[in-house]
Image (spheres, helix red, strand yellow):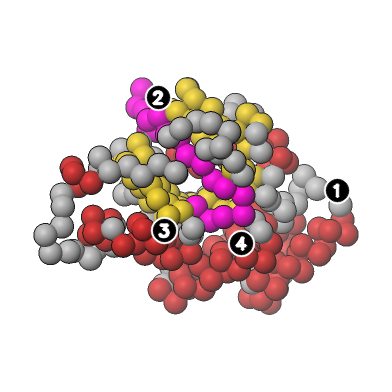
Amino acid sequence: MTDTPEAHAGAILRLRNVETYYGPIRAVRGVSLDVRTGTIVTVLGANGAGKTTILKTISGIMDPQKGAVHFRERPIQGLDPALIVKLGVSHVPEGRQVFPLLSVADNLKLGAYLRSDAVHVAKDLALVYDYFPRLQDRAGQLAGQLSGGEQQMLALGRALMARPALLLLDEPSLGLSPLLVKEIFAIIRRINAEQGTTILLVEQNANMALKVAHYGYVLEVGRIVFEGPSEELLANDDIREFYLGQKQQGARGRRRWKKRKVWR
């Protein structure tokens, strides 16, 4: 990747040569990627590829040992997660992680805990209820009593209450029925289109992710091995075989396509 001003013009998020470790284990190995303002970008890969670690590194839950993370041209690696939220980054973690003994309404209010603009907070709460009418119907119900799909809606709504410029989504389809997956992804697309929210989406459901994303990266063993516009990735025989389960006659092996990086 050519690291020039032209190469990342319009990027709200830039990672350069990021390495993040779990103890002695290097989970992310020199990752560089750009997320352009107003787009949906997806990171695909198998379990253990390092996708979740990338999101945790961006949101400040983990600190990289090497490399740089820039949000709106500001280095944010090593900052406190609360400050990163205040700067405009919201993270919806894998597994939802709602507060089960608090009501739906209180969970949503916690998403705005760093904000003091009460009038706009109320407007954003109304917007969340517009996206997720079921949350309004269950506003007084304990979050732990919601279904898995409703908890995913709540986690997403809670993140939106911080009014983020960048939304990090970790496996939003995990454990959901096909019908709910379609509903969640339709709302993700709507948030991007209507609010202009930039979204970095980590997903194992490559087919759905590439259908909503503008650009994609393929991650293997902590490294970016392939990238390109989503429509090109959807049409790539190797990705169709290894990530979409659509075997092509005469498809090339993974060892060959890993060398076919497409840098912007």
Q: Name the residue under label 2.
A: 23
Q: Mark 4 points at which residue?
A: 192
Q: Could you tell which of marks 4 and 2 lies nearer the N-terminus? A: 2
**Amino acid type assigned to the residue bearing label 1 in the image:** Ser
Q: Could you tell which of marks 4 and 3 lies nearer the N-terminus? A: 4
Q: In this view, does 245 lie to the left or right of 183?
A: left
**Amino acid type assigned to the residue bearing label 4 in the image:** Asn
In reply to whether residue 36 is colored magenta, the answer given is: yes
Numbered badge on residue 230:
3
**Amino acid type assigned to the residue bearing label 2 in the image:** Gly
Which residue is painted at 46% across and 70% down in the image? 181
Specify whether residue 56 is in view. no
User: Of discs 4 and 2, which sits in the foreground?
Assistant: 4
Q: How far apart are marks 4 and 3 (CA)?
A: 16 Å
Numbered badge on residue 116:
1
Q: Could you tell which of marks 2 and 1 lies nearer the N-terminus? A: 2
**Quarter of the picture holding the C terminus:** top left
- Secondary structure at numbered mark 3: helix
- Residue sitting nearer the eye, 97 or 254: 254
Residue 5's spot in the image, x, y percent? 58, 33
Numbered badge on residue 153:
none
Q: In this view, does 155 lie to the left or right of 67?
A: right
In reply to whether residue 251 is colored magenta, the answer given is: no
Q: Is residue 103 left or right of residue 30?
A: right
Q: In this view, does 136 lie to the left or right of 65?
A: right
Magenta residue span: 24-41
Q: How far apart are marks 1 and 4 (CA)?
A: 24 Å
Answer few, some or many: residues within 10 Å of disc 4's Cα (few below 14, many 20 plus, some between 14 and 19).
Answer: some
Which residue is painted at 31% across and 49% down in the image? 46
Image quadrant in which you'd find residue 9: top right
**Amino acid type assigned to the residue bearing label 3 in the image:** Ser
Q: How far apart are marks 4 and 2 (CA)?
A: 36 Å
